[in-house]
Amino acid sequence: MSCVNRNVLVIGGGISGLAAAYALRDVAKVTVLESSDRVGGKLRSGSLAGFSVDVGAEMVLARRPEAVELARAVGLELVHPATTSAQVLVEGELHPLPGGTLLGVPTEPKALVGLLATADLARIEAEAEGQFPPLTTDVAVGALVRERLGSAIVDRLVDPLLGGVYAGHADRLSLQATVPGLAAELAKDGSLVRSARRAAAAARGGEGPVFATIRGGLGRLPEAVAEASKASLVVNTTARELQRTADGWRVITGPTTAPVAYEADSVVVAVPAPAAARLLAPFVDTSQLGAVELASTALVSFAFPPSALPAASGVLVPASEGRFVKAVTWSSSKWSHLPGDVTLVRASVGRAREVRDLQMTDEELAARAGEDLRALGGPTAEPLDWIVTRWGGGLPQYGVGHLDLVARVRAGLPAGVAVCGAVWDGVGVPSCIRSGQQAAMRISASWEQ
């Protein structure tokens, strides 16, 4: 059978699944099954005071090629932040977020003067000069940094920075999965500071802006990719079961009393861990995959009358500060392409295993977030408009040993089935796109065997 006559089902219409569909557009007929009423997953636009704004992810790492190349390929224009100078709240005071760290792990102690006590700085300097055996096993990031450098650096920098990416806690997040460059260096030289120094230098490679978004919002990307993929999109359709057939695969959707079947030569599973575990369970042991913890969060977006904002892109708020919000973005300061008629701000709420705050009503969430905005130097006027976007189970938590889990499940997948998404290859938009592209390559390669 010629590749152009192949049929592929992509289960899940987030950016990973759409990237897979786009990569397969010229070699197969692709159908995307999406359980919600829209494609895009965590990339979404909303209406705020009459303007379209991102209510999910708002930017991508521009020094990785996947997202910027895909956006350009589908005809979208990239823009870059006006400022990336963030702040961090420490003991009630705002400080510039220091450079010279790798997700908070220090590379130069002098960059942390003012944030840490003299004894903590001396401990970091001593570690940089010490001798330690190579670290080849996976450990929790927070536990390692606390043991070597003390709790202050974890609570004030490592935890809020990792929390900003994963909505989790450094003490429960895998070193190998969340900071792979550091893990690789520690396998050669056990000093945390020296390894962070080398890993940070390698990560800085490349020129030009570090971050980018799309004019009109990152939420435009999924629909543009979906259209360019030429795939058939079927929304409001949940895949309940994956079955092997004599010639390929069958996906069962619809209610049990009136099931609807879709058949294809190959399948890409691009759904969160619990759904992926259920679909793949007949073919590979997915018990640990189904147990991967998911973090729920909420994003509160505000539009204020034109107001002065701090000269920073936003604020990281460590959990140790006891505030309601965990991060704030001064959107109108950060992005010069946003409309000047209003001042736009967004606040993030919630982390893994902290669901009590998310049980509030939207009105309560907005009121509590607004209090913190004012305390952090934001607008004092009443907002013109606000919206709350809840992301239930939005981010997988990479526990210790996560990479081994991913490798075991992937190794057991039957030919003709590939997986992609945040639980497999990283939570950032470029990582998710690359995951979808790799899934497409695995599918194409299976046809040649």
Image: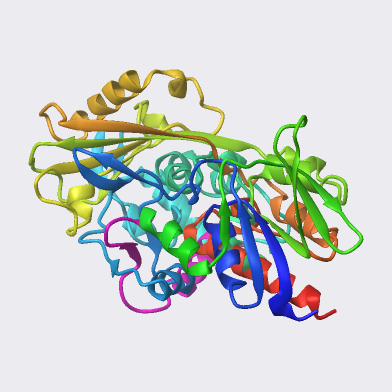
* Residue 385 visible within the image: yes
**In the drawing, does residue 241 fall left or right of residue 17?**
right
Q: Position of residue 336 (x, y in %)?
A: 17, 58
Q: Nearer the viewer, residue 35 or 165?
A: 35
Report the magenta residues as a range: 190-218
Furthest residue toward right: 246
Horizontal relation, residue 250 to residue 9: left or right: right
> In the rendered view, would you say 279 is above or below 388?
below
Q: Horizontal and vertical percent for residue 68?
A: 41, 71
Residue 390 position, x and y percent, is 44, 33
Q: State the residue at coordinates (65%, 41%).
A: 238
Residue at 34% in and 52% down:
112
Confirm whether the magenta stretch covers residue 151: no
Could you say which is closer to the camera, residue 32 or residue 270? Answer: 32
* Residue shown at 50% from the left, 61% from the top: 193
Residue 293 position by quadrant: top right
For the C terminus, the quadrant is: bottom right
* Image quadrant where one finds the N terminus: bottom right
